[in-house]
Image: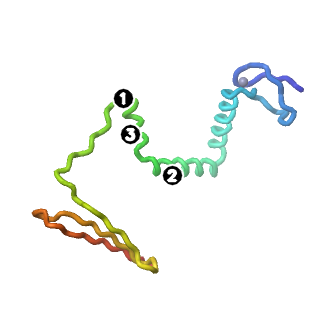
Amino acid sequence: MTRSVCVSCGQEFLVRPQSPKQTFCPGSDCQRERRRRWAQAKLKEDPDYRANQLAAQRAWHARHPEYWQTYRRRQSNEPPPSPSPTKSATSDASIFGADQFGGRWWMEIRTSGPGGAPQTVRVELTLNS
Ligand SMILES: [Zn+2]
């Protein structure tokens, strides 16, 4: 087996026969550094990879829209915002449904109207095409 010097930590290591061009030692920090450098080079030279990474980051952000607010709050030890108080509950129950062909959906929200009288609001959605 050949010996080489790691380009990350400078330690000598045994080169695996399966990867004779190995330049990083098998240490976890050096392997992480190797992957980081690979990803940076790939971002620089491969527009498809760059577009995919951007799309993945945007999709992740869409799934976690509160992440950075929470992160910044954690960093500044700011308390989380308390929900604004409401004087009374605005809805007691919601009912959802769809017709058997899937072309029409509806939702009913039962609320208290003026003076506390119960009322039902119905929202319908239809398929247009
Ligand atoms: Zn190393």
Q: Residue drawn at (39%, 77%), measured in percent from left and top? A: 104
Between disc 3 and disc 2, whose residue precedes? 2
User: The disc labelled 3 sits on which kind of residue?
Assistant: Gln
At numbered mark 3, what does the secondary structure look like: helix, strand or loop?
helix
Q: Is residue 84 visible?
A: yes
At numbered mark 1, what does the secondary structure look like: helix, strand or loop?
helix
Report if the CB atoms under discs 3 and 2 are less than 8 Å apart: no
User: The disc labelled 2 sits on which kind of residue?
Assistant: Ala
Report whether the residue tagged 1 is closer than 8 Å to ligand 1. Answer: no
Label 2 sits on residue: 59
Q: Locate residue 52, reporting x and y percent.
A: 59, 51
Q: Locate residue 92, reporting x and y percent.
A: 25, 61
Kindly give the residue lying farthest to the right in the view shown.
1
Report if the CB atoms under discs 1 and 3 are less than 8 Å apart: no
Mark 1–mark 2 Cα distance, whole angstroms, equals 27 Å
Q: Locate residue 87, reporting x and y percent.
A: 16, 51
- Image quarter hosting the C terminus: bottom left
Name the foreground residue: 70 vs 24: 70
Q: Residue drawn at (63%, 42%), measured in percent from left and top? A: 44
Q: Is residue 73 above or below residue 112?
A: above
Name the foreground residue: 51 vs 105: 105
Give the left or right position of residue 82, taking residue 14 as reference.
Answer: left
Q: Quadrant of residue 6?
A: top right
Give the left or right position of residue 22, taking residue 110 as reference.
Answer: right
Name the foreground residue: 25 vs 8: 25
Q: Is residue 85 above or below residue 19?
A: below
Label 1 sits on residue: 76
Q: Locate residue 84, reporting x and y percent.
A: 23, 45
Which numbered tag is attached to residue 69? Answer: 3
